[in-house]
Amino acid sequence: LALYAYSEIPPETKPADTVREALKDIPPGTPVEEIRRVAEILGLDVTFMKAIAKIESGFNPFAQSAMGAQGLMQVMTRVHQDKYQIFGGRNAAFDPVTNLRVGAQVLKECIQRAGNLAGGLKYYVGAANSDADGGYAVRVLAEQDRLRRVAAGQNISVNVSNAVATTSPPSCTPRARP
């Protein structure tokens, strides 16, 4: 199913191919620099990518969910094994740079598949066939706004909770309706 979904994504060049080609000669950098680099290559907003990493894992590269999502971007390793192969296999899920690269590919595919950002976030959190995403998109976009305000030098409250509700981790594969 993951291969089928991947094959249905326009345009001709798939996100994985774009990332692989653009990063083939670039040595891995720090995760923050890698977020910037991968976001730029895929045409994603840097603060958007940082917000997802914050919401998904709290920037913990060793985070692992009960559902099997792993790393900074909480990628479902068993679903996206093919994307980890060029990085040495599924054990690379806990390498922060690799996880960011794979998570960004999955995110871009989800956005392309859905046709818009909100729909892409529903796919990413595994709620594409659900009426609601458990507030996931609201939390990601609120964190993105917070990060933008911090970057602009604005004072913000540090007592804001962005805890992730219990939802399925990113797979870009729609869940069946109950």
Image (cartoon, helix red, strand yellow):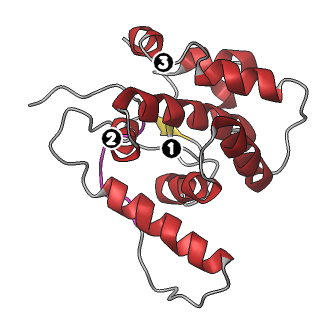
Which one is nearer the viewer's eye here, 145 or 82?
Answer: 145
Indicate whether 59 appears above or below 62: below
In this view, the mark in front (2 or 1): 2
Which one is nearer the viewer's eye here, 93 or 105?
Answer: 105
* Residue wearing tag 2: 119
The mark that comes first in sequence, 2 or 3, is 3
Secondary structure of the residue carrying numbered label 1 = loop
Residue 68 percent coordinates (x, y): 44, 34
In this view, the mark in front (2 or 3): 3
What is the span of residues highlighted in magenta in the rendered image?
163-170
Indicate whether 80 appears above or below 68: above
The reply to whether residue 35 is in sight is yes
Identity, as a three-letter code, of the amino acid under mark 3: Pro
Residue 26 percent coordinates (x, y): 89, 33
The quadrant the N terminus occupies is top left
* Residue wearing tag 3: 10
Identity, as a three-letter code, of the amino acid under mark 2: Gly
* Residue wearing tag 1: 64
Which one is nearer the viewer's eye here, 133 or 56?
Answer: 133
* 97 left or right of 69 in image: right
The quadrant the C terminus occupies is top left
